Image: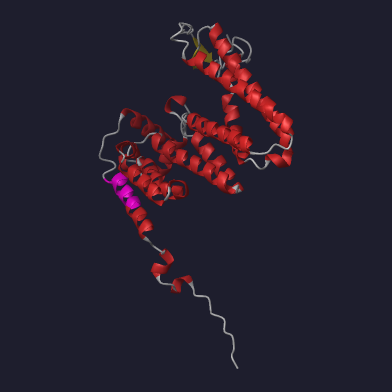
Amino acid sequence: MATATMDKPVSMLDRPLGSVLALDWEKGLYAVLILAAFVTRFYDLGARVMSHDESLHTQYSWYLYKNGNYQHTPMMHGPLKFHLTAFTYWLFGDNDFTARIPTALMGVAAVALCYFFRKWLGRSGALLAALLMLISPYQLYYSRYIRDEPYVMVWGLLLVLGVLNYLDSRSPKWLYSLALVSALFYTTMESSFIYIAIVMVFLGLFLVYDLLRTAWPRPELRQPFFALLAVAVIAALIGVGLFFYRDRLGIAPPSSAAEVQVPADPGRTTPESGPISPMETYADLAWLGALMAGAGGLYFVARAFGREGLKRFPALDLIAVLGLFALPQLAALPVRGLQRNPLNYTLPPMDGFN
């Protein structure tokens, strides 16, 4: 009489090491590239003398490490690097080598992150990207330099990775990861606005592409949407043209050396801008028109598809998450559009603004 026997599960500790690692040529090459990144980023890291920018970053990180004092100043960009550098001082002591550990780790992470782009770049393309990231003189130099560029590089890669994965899987975890990356990005450097703006332009184009190829439940609303979209694009182009070409057209506002005192610190002042030219007002109005036309277009989309129908467009979710972080930081734009100076911190807010 035959009896069925159940195979006893094999403990992970009993498995051969090779079967656990499952190392193939691709993973082996990545391991070599990451090891080379560690060597090139960390070898003799403290030998080079600190530059001017590095001296500021290390000095104020040391103040934070030594006595907990830190005050954010936009001149030195975001606070993240100061806190991470102070943390490495606390772990390993304060010297030139330890000051550069966080940025060196970011340089290694940038090489390793290329592995996760295989789905879009292909296996060979991702390997080539990792190799180029490793040997790039720019990446190597700034990975051994205590500035914001290595952080920006990693947050930018993670931002794109989160967007691509969410468009592919619609998994909520990628929205949470984007919220985290955006927060870290904004605490690093002002260039975060540029990166996120580029991503949001891509998402806007992706949304329009989706709307073009999708059958509308209410076809009569399709034409008004695309008409408003055209108005928004034209108005935005006019606003950009007036803003960037005002110098060539001779309509730039005169500069002013006037300064406004900061109430919280009478010794500090902020620059007061010169008069706002009519052309700048026209540019602001063009941008306002673009925003209103865009909002009107989204209204027609919402009317056509309804709440459930909108769920078929993943780009909308991503725009909502990234836009939620950006909106509070864009408060200076409507203030400027109202002929006020957003750099004037005097109180009460409406008195003495001009």
**Residue 354 location, x and y as percent?**
57, 8
Numbered marks: total: 0
For residue 219: magenta? no
Residue at point 73%, 30% (across, down):
220
Extreme bottom residue here? 1
Residue at point 38%, 57% (across, down):
27
Q: Is residue 40 visible?
A: yes
Residue at point 38%, 34% (across, down):
147
For residue 36: magenta? yes
Residue at point 52%, 12% (across, down):
260
Q: Quadrant of residue 56?
A: top left
Q: Quadrant of the N terminus?
A: bottom right
Q: Is residue 25 above or below residue 58?
A: below
Q: Is residue 315 above or below residue 330?
A: below
**Residue 38 location, x and y as percent?**
33, 49
**Residue 178 location, x and y as percent?**
55, 41
**Is 224 on the left-hand or right-hand side of 331?**
right
Q: Magenta part of the protein: which range?
A: 33-43
Q: Is residue 276 visible?
A: no
- What is the magenta segment's predominant secondary structure? helix
Q: Nearer the viewer, residue 341 or 233?
A: 233
Task: Name the colour scheme.
Answer: secondary structure
**Is 96 on the left-hand or right-hand side of 326?**
left
Q: Quadrant of residue 110?
A: top left
